[in-house]
Amino acid sequence: MSGFFRRLAGIPWRSIAGDAFSRALLVAQAYCAVHVVDQHLCSLAFVRGPSMLPAINLAGDVLAVDRVSARLGRVENGDVVLMISPEDPRKVVAKRVLGMEGDSVTYLVDPGNSDASKTVVVPQGHVWVQGDNIYASKDSRQFGAVPYGLITGKIFCRVSSVIFFAS
Amino acid sequence: MARALAFAWPYAKFCIVGGLFGRTFADWCASVSSVDGESMSPTLDGHQAERMLVEKRCLYTYDFTRGDVVVLRSPRSHREVLVKRLIALPGDWIQVPENQEIRQIPQGHCWVEGDNAANSSDSRSYGPVPLGLMQGRVTHVVWPPQRIRRVDRNMPEGRIMSQ
């Protein structure tokens, strides 16, 4: 019985604790580095759905997202952006920017059924986003121009096709 | 040259790691921000160089309560950050006395107003704002020491009919 306690006292608790702490610190540093790069520099996003056909696959594509240009305000007409959905803040959607603030945007109201079109001026601080597949996309034609602050990143590269090509 | 770098490297590493930890903590838990302007007086007073504690845990599920003081990106200019009180949540009907109208807040949006109604440009001018613009909730004022206190949620009377 006392032999057990003697063995217990003989274990180098201090150095084990020191090792455990330095490893945990390393893991924490790695996690923080990954988080900062992912949220503020560059990230990967898996995007799927019909609204951006043919640019983005129905079954999904892995895309590289540039967070720096979105934060610096360097988003222009024609860019595909990742943004928080104005209808549900827990969802992130990918759409194409078709109008910046002050631009006059003309769009088809109901492309499948009629030729009617409407023209709107994008208000200050907002952008007009549309999916490439206008027949199957819920975008600014339904919920209006969205504030620029909802944009979280600009998509600049499709990573999944690079992977498939290389293999 | 190599010696100077070897000497400075531990300090540089300490600063970089500290920055990463700080940035991650500010994004996930809470951060301290300064108040600018008078749209929230007397609750928050920009003229006294007040600093407020902004907690970020509400952003995990976008779970806000009516009456919270929130920090949000301005819908008019994405670089500007505003502090307002959240008056109505999605689905609520809000009475806007200035325009003598009653509006329903659409899904995913909220209605924000400054406490200093005369001196605040808020949802009464630009309408409901998407919840995706929220950047955090103000829970305490932490500076100057004589003004340290909790920032409570309180609601103006009779403005909303919730579902």
Image (cartoon, coloured by chain):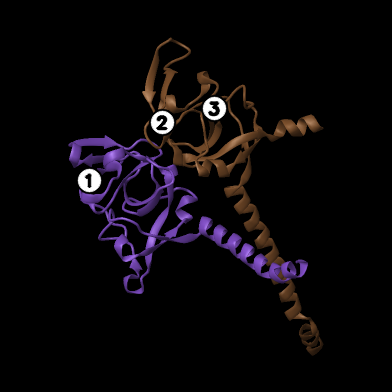
Q: Which picture quadrant has residue A22? A: bottom right
Q: Is A48 or B161 nearer to us in this picture?
A: A48
Q: Which mark is residue A78?
A: 3
On the same chain, marks 3 and 2? The answer is yes
Image location of residue B79, percent across then percent down: 44, 46
Up-down relation of residue B133 to residue A143 (above or below):
below
CB atoms at circles 3 and 2 under 8 Å apart?
Answer: no
- Badge 1 marks a residue whose secondary structure is loop
- Badge 3 marks a residue whose secondary structure is loop
Chain B shade in the render: purple
Chain in brown?
A
Image location of residue B88, percent across then percent down: 31, 45
Residue where numbered disc 2 is placed: A145
Up-down relation of residue A68 to residue A81 (above or below):
below
Q: CA distance from mark 1 to mark 3?
A: 42 Å
- Badge 2 marks a residue whose secondary structure is loop
Up-down relation of residue B39 to residue A148 (above or below):
below
Q: Is A79 or B85 nearer to us in this picture?
A: A79
Q: Identify residue type, mark 1.
A: Arg
* Image mark 1: chain: B
Up-down relation of residue A35 to residue B4 (above or below):
above
- Left or right: B5 with respect to B40? right
| The C terminus of chain B lies in quadrant | top left
Residue where numbered disc 1 is placed: B159
Q: CA distance from mark 2 to mark 1?
A: 27 Å
Image location of residue A4, percent across then percent down: 79, 84
* Residue at the far bottom in the pictured view: A2
Q: Identify residue type, mark 3.
A: Gly
